[in-house]
Image (spheres, helix red, strand yellow):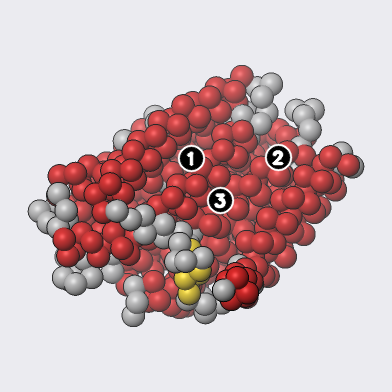
Amino acid sequence: MEAIFGSILLKELGLIVPELILLAIFILLIIIDLIFKNNKLNATVSIIGSFIVLLSLLTQKDLNTALFMGIYIIDPFGVFFKYLVILSTLIVFLMSIISEELHNSKIWLGEYYILIFGMAIGMFFISGSVNLILIYLSLETMSMSSYVLAGYTKQIKRASEASLKYVIFGSLSSGIMIFGISLLYGLTGSLDLNTINLYIATDGANNLLLFVSFLFILVGFGYKISAVPFHFWTPDVYEGSPITITAYLSVASKAAGFAVFVRFLYMALVDNTAYFSGVYSIIKNVKWDYVIAVLSVLTMTLGNVVALWQNNVKRMLAYSSIAHAGYILMAVTVMSNLGISSILIYLFFYLFMNFGAFLIVMIFAHKIGSEDMDKYVGLGYRSPLMATLLTIILVSLIGLPPTGGFIGKLYIFWAVLDKGMIWLAVIGILNSVISLYYYAKVIRNMWLRDVDSQNEKLQYSIYTNILAIALTIPILLFFVYFSPILKWAEYSANIFLGK
């Protein structure tokens, strides 16, 4: 029996090669940091390790299997998010090389790289978790690292404040979530999402207690994706964290949050025995699609409206990030093939848009010493390349052609309209119009204000220019040729929905 169990375990371990490589690099970085104390060596190993993990994900291509007694799943849906996470990790390391905020702070960066890999490990496992305890442990793994990273430049006052607020709000949401999990376990006697779904569908547990338990669990997910009213930590943490970490939290952490959020909703709340028209019907008399739709409306509206009043570009992008979570939640309401694939498409483009935006904000901050929007006046003529790239990225964040952001929003609105939720699509379009104003303020400052008074040209290294261009090209390229991304997203959604 032990030999059989050992054989099964080895076989299953062989299927999680990327996760094991990620863990091995994490341990290797700890050893290197203890022995060599060399920032450049840590950065080099981190970048090479990220490439290796990226390539190793090919071993999970087309897999659709449950491992470790069914608590962890490898499927194309989860693998899609793993690609987003490791690409984000790689980009953060590449950004960190030129981050004066990190290198001028005179702090040791060994733990910085280790903690980012610690976050990545949590995000990898959360993308395939179908057991509530594994989901919670994965969330805490990524959260613990992110709390420290948010305040890594601790000599800066706002960084310490950001880290403290992040810990407080994170602890509160985690406590509420684990209480919801305990309630759900007490009601159903299981932590497995499929078993919970089957129990509720056949036995009809107490609807009120189920509603409360699911609501508490959703608090934890809402916190991770910065959905209103769980967004309070986002602006302060994004503004106070190093820009590299702000970008990582806004993309990778959000993607991982949506991965587990969508999986939880579909596997636990959708009644597969009476499922129709994308309606969540597992708990009778509770229209979860409308609950999430209201959450979507509140999130995108608050994010966009409050962003209008921001004068700090980094803080403006934080509220923008909240608004984009609201757009993605529009597609979550329908839980259809088109809805799931539109989420994946949007997050793919969002990766390049947000990293590109934060990279150029970081570059400008190095040169002009400020993140204030008023300091961007004339940058279109002092730094024409960077200003042009930032303009393209902001146009994409608005969702206008000819950019990938337009494709992402097009599929989001299409998914919502396909399910007849015209009112939600209209609100989404109105919010996009609102976002046009605050993004256009940045573009106006760069190209139209005080043009004649700005003569000094800003110079950048070749590496900086290449990295900024590399993040912007996909935004334009995939507007023209987006069919590979569309096919990849549709395939991942089909497998996820069992079609």
Please tell me whether residue 29 is drawn above or below residue 164 in the rendered image.
below
Camera sees residue 79: yes
Closest to the observer, 489 or 37: 37
Check disc 2 and report the residue beneath it. Answer: 112
Residue at 40%, 31% in the rendered image: 172
Q: Horizontal placement of 163 versus 112: left or right?
A: left
Q: Horizontal placement of 261 versus 215: left or right?
A: right
Check disc 1 and report the residue beneath it. Answer: 317
> x and y percent of residue 393 in the render?
53, 53
Residue at 71%, 39% in the rendered image: 112
Residue at 64%, 65% in the rendered image: 18
Mark closer to the chain start, 2 or 3:
2
Q: Amino acid at mark 3?
A: Gly
Closest to the observer, 13 or 211: 13
Closest to the observer, 414 or 245: 245
Please tell me whether residue 256 is drawn above or below residue 416 in the rendered image.
above
Residue 122 is labelled as 3
